[in-house]
Structure formats: C-alpha cells, structure tokens
Image: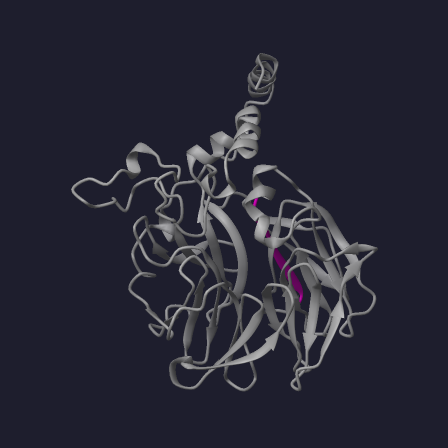
Amino acid sequence: MGAFTYFLRDLEQILFPNRDQHAIPAMDGGYTPNDRLDALSPIGAPIPGADDIAEGGDGAIYVSAGKQVLRLAGARYEARSVFAEFDGAAGGLVFHPDGRLLVCVTGRGLAAVDAGGRQSWLNQVEDQPLQCLTSVAVATDGNIFMTDGSSRHVREDWVRDLMEKNHLGRLVACGAGLDGAKSLLRDLYYPHGVAIAADGKTLWFTESWKHQISRAAISGHDIAAPQTVIGNVPGYPTRLGYCAGGGFWLSVFAVRTHLVEFVLREDDFRQEMMETIPPGLWISPALATSGHCHEPMQFGSIKALGIEKPWAPPRSYGLLARIDQEGEAVESLHSRVGGRHHGITAARDTAQGLVIVSRGSGRVLLDRSGGGV
C-alpha cells in the first residue's frame, strides 16, 4: 500500500470523524463466550461436508452434505438414508408448502425435489448462472427467495471471495413453479442467509463480508427497500434458522479478528499472499483449524503448558446466537479456541430440540435443553 493511500485514509478520518469504522464489537451481553456447543452430543457418526438442515412434514430432518441430501429420522435422528444426490455440492435447504425440498446446488442452481425424487431446476436468472446459491426461503404464498453469494466464485471458494473484497452477490426471487425469476438486489457483500419472519410479511437476509443483517417488507415476489437490523456482527453471519421462541437462530461461521481485518486493509500484502501462498495457509477465517505446522498463528495462540487458551486469537470458532425480532442477541452458544464444534452454518428448532450443523467438525448436534423451544 503506497503512501498516498495512507494519506487518503488519514484525510478521511479527519474530514469524517463520525463515520462508522466498523470496529469489531466486544463479545458481551447476549454474545458472552461459553462452552455450550462443546457440551452438546453429536447425532450419530460425523457427516463430512454437513452444511444445512430442514425439517420435513414427516418429522425427519434433512441434511445437505457433499453431493447428497441425507434423511435423518427416528429417535435422536439416528436412522440415516440418502434422499437425493446431485452432481454439485448441496447447500441451503428449505421445504416448500407443497412438499418439495428446495436445494441450493453449487455450480448448478436451485433444485426442487418432490417426494418421488424427481428434480426440476432453476439454473440462471437474467442470463446469469446461479453458481453460488447459499440459502433459500419460501414465503407464505409459495414464492421463493434465494441468496446468490458471488457471480465470480462458487461456494467452496468463499475465502478467495473475501480476500478479493468482492461484493458481487444478489438476492433473487421466483414463483412457486421456478418461473418469473428476477434479481431483487445486486452488489451484495456475499449474501449467505435468507429467511421469512414469523409474521410472513418480512424477509431477512445476511451479508457475510459486511457483517450485516437486513430486512425488507415482502410484496409478492418483490420487496421494499431493505433496512439494516444489525450493522456490525462480531463474526461472519451465515444462515437464519427457525426459532420456536420467536426471532431467529443466527449461525456465525467464524468470528472476526484484528489480524484478518488488518490484512483486508493492506491491499499489497494481501495480493502478494494470495499469489504466493496456498489458500489453506492464508491469513483468513477458517471453518476449522487444521493443525498444519505452517498455519498462520498469532503469539497469543501458542500453547502454554500444553494448553491452547480459550481466549486466544481464533482462526476458527463456533458461534450460534438467538436474536429477537429487533436483532438483539438474547443468548448464544459457543465453541471457543481449542473447542470441537467450529464453523456453525445452520441451526433450527425441531420437534426433538435444537439441531445445529457444525461444518467445521462435520457434526450435527442436538440440544434438548429447550433454550429457544
């Protein structure tokens, strides 16, 4: 970064001293750290690539994992079977009121799968392919809303999209028959989650790279101008899940750190890092810690007496928050540094309790304590 860039940054701070700098907020109040995620029991064996969940009318839950959607049924959801398979990675899930399961498939688009396994597809909108669908929601009238994270990268390349500081996402809508598709919002900062509020009148969506949650009134398969609900989340928000107690379960797949924020400001350094170092070793958030000897580490993360301190600067982290209808965090579940269940990408209340997806560990967790039920 040249001297002129530094001069412009300093000048901006002088001319606009009250401009929001989006400093990382403290983890306090409803976000106070704990070990609740690590205290939960996984449902059966690991499910590598587990990403999202949906609850069916049959009482089972459906989990996207790799190129499959699995059906988990029975007591504690321990009976498993394959419900659908695709030629791309399955991600966001939701059931349509008519019984079809809507699946976001990387590189392909949106699949609608009926009870017999037949698939229909929405592959592009306004001549632009849906290659990075991250989440899908259905309004009470059957209209469908989707978040398309990036027009440049597929979902597996989310780290590169962050490091390039892209805002190439969009919010898309279509009719119940996957017809009349159109883009509602463009230039979004990696929209990662979309959900319909309990009143059926409001749509909420997240932007991971902007650390923001917004909402907008629904009108058919169109929306009014969005309003910011949370402007500075302490991590990278992903999906919004059904909460029986009102509001939403907000999944946060990684928390922000001062080191990553610094790297995102230093364009020359970041560009050289991306050109010369393998992506797995970039200074960036991660869904899980690999333990590789070359993995970037801050001094505070060095083990002392064989222990990695829970308050050490995190490369990966587990965070799930319950937010109310105004976006305030009511409670949260954490897996801190050294914990087992990082990279939370989905959660929702079900008939058997709160089901949580830890993509970092490839585990689906079940909480029967009834915190949000």
The answer to which image quadrant residue 231 occupies is top right
Residue 330 image point, x, y percent: 41, 58
Q: Residue furthest left?
A: 305
98 above or below 303? below
Q: Splitting the image into 4 quarters, where does residue 163 fall?
A: top right
Question: Is residue 19 at least partly visible in the picture?
Answer: no
Quadrant showing the N terminus? top right
At x 35%, y 55%, the residue is 334
Residue 241 coordinates in the image, percent (x, y) = 52, 65
> In front: 251, or 321?
251
Identify the magenta region.
201-209
For residue 322, side relative to residue 161 (left or right): left
- Is residue 292 on the magenta stretch? no
State left or right for residue 49 relative to residue 210: left
Residue 268 is situated, as x and y percent measured from the top left of the image, at 56, 24
Percent coordinates x, y for residue 25 in the rendering = 43, 40
**310 displayed left or right of 351:** left
Quick check: can you spot residue 169?
yes
Q: Quadrant of residue 373?
A: bottom left
Q: Most prominent secondary structure in the magenta stretch?
A: strand
Q: Residue at x 61, y 56 (%)?
A: 205
Whether 241 is drawn above or below 10: the answer is below
Report the coloring of the rendering: one colour
Vertical side of 116 occupied by 355: above or below: above
- Counting every numbered tag in the picture gives 0
